[in-house]
Image: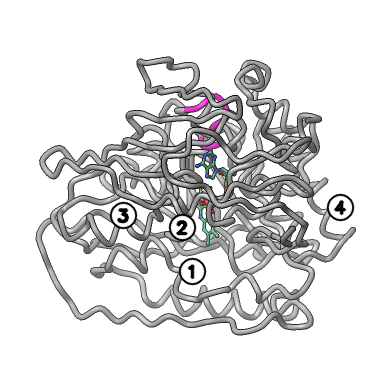
Amino acid sequence: MVAVSSWGMLGSWEHDVRHLQRGASRLPVAAGLTGLAYGMGRSYGDVCLNPDGVLWQTTGLDRFVSFDPVLGRLVCEPGVLLRDIQRVMVPRGWILPVTPGSQYVTVGGAVANDVHGKNHHVAGSFGEHVRRLMLLRTDGSVIECSPTRQPEWFQATIGGMGLTGVITEVDMQLHKIASPWLEVETLAYHNLDEFFALSAASEYNWDYTVSWVDCLHAAGRGIFMRANHAAAEQTPAVQSRTLNMPFVPPVSLLNKYSVKPFNFLYFNLKKHQVGKKLMHYQPFFYPLDNVLNWNRIYGPRGFYQYQSVVPVEHGRDAIQAMLKEIARAGAGSFLAVLKTFGSREPAGMMSFAEQGVTLALDFANQGAVTLQLFERLDAIVREAGGKLYPAKDARMPRELFESGYPRLDEFLSYRDPGISSALSRRLTGS
Ligand SMILES: Cc1cc2nc3c(=O)[nH]c(=O)nc-3n(C[C@H](O)[C@H](O)[C@H](O)COP(=O)(O)OP(=O)(O)OC[C@H]3O[C@@H](n4cnc5c(N)ncnc54)[C@H](O)[C@@H]3O)c2cc1C
C-alpha cells in the first residue's frame, strides 16, 4: 500500500497502486477491492482518490498513436500529458483546443473531468473536441463510443469522473494556429459591473478571457485579461524561469495578514501596467506551472478550492454576496479567478462548465472555520441555482451535488460496479 494525496494536500491515504500496462485486455483488480484511474492527481479534492482501494496509475500509457497533420486529428493514450501535446504540436501549427490552468494534467483526467479553459465562450470544454473514446470496463468489456456511436456511453464518460470505466484511447481534434504567441490585453476593473461589461464586450472578438479578482475587496475589483492567437509568427525572446516551493512550511504562508496587503499591491501594480502585449502561450495558459509545488505554500493542513458556477441572471448578486462573505471572514487567498462561461451545450451528462459566471478561490484549511464559511457560500450558490465543480471539491454536501447535476440518476446507470472513489462514496453512497 502507498500513501497518495491529491493537489489540495488535505491528507494522504493508503492505496494499492497498480501501473496500467499498454495493451492489457483486463484491468488489474484486487479481490474485494474497487479500483479507480489516477492520472497526475492534479484534482484538488477526492475525485481521484480511492482510499484502501486500488488506484490504476495511467501515466505509463503515454503514447501518441497517430496524428493527421492536415486535419489536426490526434489519437493518443490517456496518460499523455497536455504539456507533451503542446510541446510536440505547437511547432507544427496545432494547439489544444481547450486547456486548463495546468499542463501537468493527463488526457484521461482532462476527459474525465471535462475540463474547461479560458475560451469556454468560443470552444466549450475539453469533451467537445473529443471525437472518439475507448473505454475498458472491469468485466473486461471494451466500449468504443463517440458523439454518434453509443453516444450515451460517450456522454456518461465525458465528465464522468472515471466512474464509467478506464479510458484507454482518445481521438481528438486540435486547433490550428499561426503562432505560439498571443496578443494579450490587460485591463483593470473596479467593481463587478465593470467586470460584466468587459466580459460582454469581449465575448465576440476575443478567444480567451479571464480575470483575477481581489477576494478581500467586497466591491469586486480585479484585473481582466483577454487574448487572441497572434496572426503570424513573432518571436520575442522567451523569458521563462521555473521556481520551486522546496518545502512545506509549518503554517500556511497565505493568511489574512499576508493576503490583504498582497492583493492591494498586486492590483495597484497591475493597474498601471494595463495595455496590450505579446505573450507566449505557456505563461498565459499556465501561470502557476512556473512555480513547482506551489500547493505546499498552504502548509501541512493543505487547502481547499471552492469553484462554483451560477446562472447569468443571478450571477452578479451571487458573486457579490460570496465576495462579501469571504471579505467578512478575511479568508480566501491571492489565487482567485472570476470568469464567464458561454452558452455551449455541455458535452457530458456530468459536465461542470455551463453558461454562467464562475468563481474559483483557494482557501487554506483552517478546519471548522473554513468549512463553516463554505456552508454560507453553498447557501448562496444553491439560492442562485448554481453548482460546484467535483474536480476541485472535497466536501460539498450531497444535496447540492444532486441539485447541481440533474442528469445524475441517468449517469449512475452507466457506472462500472468495480470502480469507486472517495468522492463517489461521499456523494452517491457507493
Ligand atoms: C494549477 C491547476 C490549475 C487548474 N486549472 C483548471 C482549469 O482552468 N479548468 C479546469 O477544468 N480544471 C483545472 N484544474 C483541474 C485539473 O485540470 C483537473 O482536475 C484534471 O482532471 C486533472 O487531471 P489529472 O491527470 O491530474 O487527473 P487526476 O486528478 O489524477 O484524476 C481526475 C479524474 O480523472 C479520472 N481519470 C484519470 N485518468 C483516467 C482514465 N484514463 N480513464 C478514466 N478516468 C480517468 C480519475 O479517476 C479522476 O476521477 C487545475 C488544476 C491545477 C493543479
Q: Position of residue 108 (x, y in %)?
A: 47, 43
Per the model, the C-alpha gap separating discs 2 and 3 is: 15 Å
Q: Earlier in the sequence, mark 2 or mark 4?
A: 2
Q: Earlier in the sequence, mark 3 or mark 1?
A: 3
Callouts 3 and 4 close, C-beta under 8 Å: no
Q: Amino acid at mark 2?
A: Gly
Q: Position of residue 67 (x, y in %)?
A: 20, 43
Question: Which residue is label 3 attached to?
Answer: 85
Residue 127 versus residue 216: which sits nearer the camera?
127
Q: Earlier in the sequence, mark 4 or mark 1?
A: 1
Q: Amino acid at mark 3?
A: Ile
Question: Which residue is label 2 attached to?
Answer: 101
Question: Which residue is label 1 attached to?
Answer: 288
Per the model, the C-alpha gap separating discs 1 and 2 is: 7 Å
Q: What secondary structure characterizes most of the magenta part?
A: loop
Q: Earlier in the sequence, mark 2 or mark 3?
A: 3
* Relative to 316, 183 lies left or right: left
Q: Earlier in the sequence, mark 3 or mark 4?
A: 3
* Numbered disc 2: secondary structure: loop
Question: Which residue is label 4 attached to?
Answer: 372
